[in-house]
Structure formats: structure tokens, C-alpha cells
Amino acid sequence: MENSHEVQPTQFLDQVRLGQTEWFRTFFGIVLILFFWFILGGLFVLLPVVWAWVDGNPDTAVDLQTGLVTGVNPLVNYIAANLSFVPLIAGIFVTVRFVHGRPFRSIITPAKTLNWRRVGQGFGLWLLLVTLASVVEYLLNPEIYTVVFHPARFFLFAIAVLLLTPVQTTAEELLFRGYLLQASGHLGRNFGALALLNGFLFMVPHLGNPELAANAILLPLFYLSIGAFFAFITLRDNSAELAIGAHASNNLYSALFANYTNSALQTESIFLVTELDAVYALVSFWVMAIVFYLILLRGRGESPSWSAADDAN
């Protein structure tokens, strides 16, 4: 049954109570989002194929693991892969606005406007932390870092990275830390449990990444940790703004400064990491997460209390 409120809810998880709230709308919304993401977004895999055909290159093939096309310019693959997230954003928008009939911004924040300062804080602090983590790794294991900087190719790639990587990361945040995290709030209001569930959901689509060849146990745990942490800070901050900023800076750093040899998306970075240390990646991530939390979220108060009536939805 649809619920109506004279006053807009002020808690992030309560935004699902705006508009049309029946369970079947959430089910249909998830199916619709997945259709936009995997079917419409998947059509972008044809872009490198068409490019190779126009370029007269017969030595191309689709890598079934990554969905990328081998034998073409990596920039074309990069553009196609990131453009595939545009339909995902469109699917989320259509679902939130027309299936549920609530404001699109409600999956980011209960406030009336987006707090760009908070996005910037998340972006800047996480960029600093991931840079420091790379410096420490280099000092501990310098032989895995190789300078591969080629100015002409780098700056051309950098334009695409700066324009498209935030599209990809924001799309993932809108889906996982926005729509799905709020929907899971119907199951309960334990922030830790919801964060772990969200981390698991975030891990699943990343299980096909070629990086997992380095460690099939710790790297899935790494992805689960990222998703769970971003979900937890979203719940604690009562908005997804910090997570949106941190996720964008994390991927921008990897794409431009220290990409991995076996990365799902190859870019023209300054350094190339030839060996992925899964133990260091996991441990350094949690050190970064703790520092990030203490600087930006310590002292913001305890989790809000929820009455039994709140869960009777």
C-alpha cells in the first residue's frame, strides 16, 4: 500500500517511502535497471567491433571474460566500456522517477540539494589516502612499479578518463549505495548488516574481473570491503555524497597514475603495476577506510534509533 507523508522523510533509508512503494514496483524496477545496464549498455560492445571494421582490422575478437574487444585501440575499448554505464544511469532515473514517482535526488540525499562540498571532501581525502598507500607500496616493493608514461598518448587518454570515469563510478553508486541500499532498508535498520549485504551485491558483478587471477579469495573480499565501507559511510553520513566522491577519485587514480597490467580496463597511466599484492591491497584499504571515517565521520552522532512503527511498512 502506498504511504504518504506531509513532511518529506529526513533519513536516507526512509526515502523509499516517497511515492509509490509497493514491493512489485521494486522488483520491476530492479529488472528494468538490469535491462538498461546489461542489454542496452551491452550494445556499446559493438562500438569497438564497428571501429575495427571501419579501420579494416580483421584480427579482432570479443573477450568473453571482460566483454572488451581485442585487437583495437585501448582508448576505443575504454570509451565503449564506460559509455555502457550511461544506460544504467538512465534506467535508474526512469525507475526512480516513473516507477516509484519520487525525486531522483532522493537516492543520493534526503536534502533538497546535493552537497557538492561533501562530494569534494570524499574525493579529495580518498585521493590523498590512495596516493599515500601507493607511495608506501612503492617503498616496500619498488620492482612492481614501472614507468610507462608516454605524454601524447597519456593526455589523449586523460581527457576520456576525466570525462567518463566519474560517469562509471557515479552510476555504480546510484545503483548500489542509492537504489539497492535504500531498498534493503525494508529488511531492517542495522547499519552493519545492511553494509555487508550491499558489499556482497557490489562484489558479485566484479567477480568476472581479470584481476581476480592474482588471488581468488582475497580480491573478492577486497571488493566486498569496498562496497560495504561505501555503504556504511552512506548510512552514517545520511547521504551517498562521500561515497560518490571517494569512488570517483579511487578509479581516476588507478586509471591515470597506477594502472595494473591485468586490469579489466587498460589505460595510458604514468605507472604500471606489474604484480597485484592482494594482501597489501586489502590491508591498506582498511587502513585508508579507518582514517577516512575518523576524519570525516567521527563525532557525527550515533546511528538514529528506529521505532517498531518505522519498520512496519
Image (spheres, grey):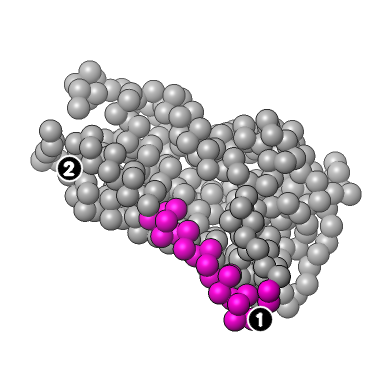
Q: Amino acid at mark 2?
A: Gln
Q: In terms of secondary structure, what is the magenta stretch mainly?
A: helix
Say which residue appears at 27% left-offset and 43% top-offset.
Answer: 28
Residue 192 in percent (x, y) is at 46, 25
Residue closer to the observer: 87 or 298: 87
Residue 20's disc is: 2
Q: Amino acid at mark 1?
A: Gly
Q: Left or right of 291: which side holds 22?
A: left
Q: Residue furthest top?
A: 308
Q: Where are the magenta residues, as a range?
A: 36-58
How far apart marks 2 and 1 lie (CA) works out to 51 Å
Residue closer to the observer: 115 or 82: 82
Is the C-beta separation of discs 2 and 1 under 8 Å? no
Residue 29 appears in view: yes
Residue 218 in percent (x, y) is at 68, 32
Residue 256 appears in view: no
Residue matched to label 1: 56
Mark 1 is surrounded, within 10 Å at the Cα level, by few (under 14), some (14 to 19) or many (20 or more) other residues, namely few
Q: Is residue 55 magenta?
A: yes
Q: Which circle's residue, 2 or 1, is located before the other in the chain?
A: 2
Quarter of the image with the C terminus is: top left
